Amino acid sequence: MKLHKAIRFITLITVLIIQIVFLSTIVKEKYETDHYTAALSILFIAVTIIFGYRYLDLHHEEYSYEKISVAIWVPIGAVACYLLNSFTGFGSVLSAGILGTLASFIPAIKKESLYFEKLPPAIYCGAFVGMSSVEIAPSINYVIDAGVLAGIFLMLSKSLFLGIGGKLGTIAFGGVALVSLLYSLLS
């Protein structure tokens, strides 16, 4: 039980830090010359996010994790969307839309399969990773790494952020942001 609480805590803190840093960067860029307004805005954003996590009922009390056999489809969806975006000229939005539409038909292959029912969200989460521009994701290895990390986040966040819109995009963003950080630290 302590392991589950630790995993939940680490996952929540990771997402919280990513959100605060991302929003703070936006505010800092917007108010480059007015440091006082930027500092107050960043403080307000951080406090709002922390109170939101603390007092909103975003999570089940049960601990459940997505299966690896489902999460493996996140990097597959990321690579498929990246390749569709890079080599067809469709663009990232259309590529993700095509991939998401195709993934939505997977449960129809075998209607009674619970496994097939879980694949479209995982593939679509990967499509969000694969939407990254070539400037952000310069190679297929980068996309694979970000997809794997997003897949791990998907596995760990099954019982987190329930009923909150944007969960798949936030997971994909977390994977891409952390891989960007790791790549920049390692180079």
Image (cartoon, rainbow, N blue to C red):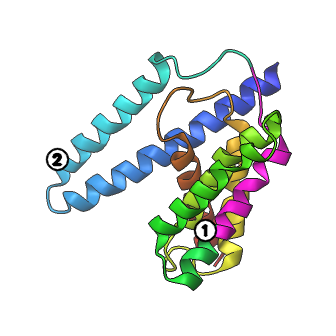
Q: Looking at the picture, does residue 86 appear above or below residue 92? A: below
| 108 sits left or right of 56 in the view | right
- Residue 126 is tagged as none
Q: Residue at x 42, y 25 (%)?
A: 52
Residue range in magenta is 63-80
Q: In which quadrant of the rendered image does the C terminus lie?
A: bottom right
The foreground one among 4 and 95 is 95
Give the number of marks.
2
Please determine whether, in this image, residue 186 is positioned above or below residue 76: below
In front of the other: 13 or 114:
114
* Residue 89: x %, y % from top left: 49, 83
Q: Amino acid at mark 1?
A: Cys
Residue at the image point whose x is 82% and y is 33% from the top: 112
* Residue designated by label 1: 81
Amino acid found under the numbered disc labelled 2: Thr
**Residue 34 appears in which quarter of the rendering?**
bottom left
Give the prevailing secondary structure in the magenta stretch: helix
- State the image coordinates of residue 61 (x, y, percent, origin top left): 67, 15
What element does badge 1 sit on?
A: helix
The percent coordinates of residue 114 (x first, y second) are: 80, 34
Question: Which residue position is annotated with label 2?
Answer: 37
Q: Is residue 77 magenta?
A: yes
Neighbour tally class for label 1: few under 14, some 14-19, many 20 plus, Cα within 10 Å: many
Residue at x 83%, y 36% (from the top left corner): 113
The x, y position of residue 131, in whole percent, is: 52, 66
In the visual, does 36 lie left or right of 78?
left
- Hey, which quadrant is residue 20 in on the image? top left
Nearer to us of marks 2 and 1 is 1
Tell me which numbered mark, 2 or 1, is placed earlier along the sequence. Answer: 2
* In magenta segment, residue 14: no
Determine whether 140 is above or below 14 in the image: below
Q: CA distance from mark 2 to mark 1?
A: 39 Å
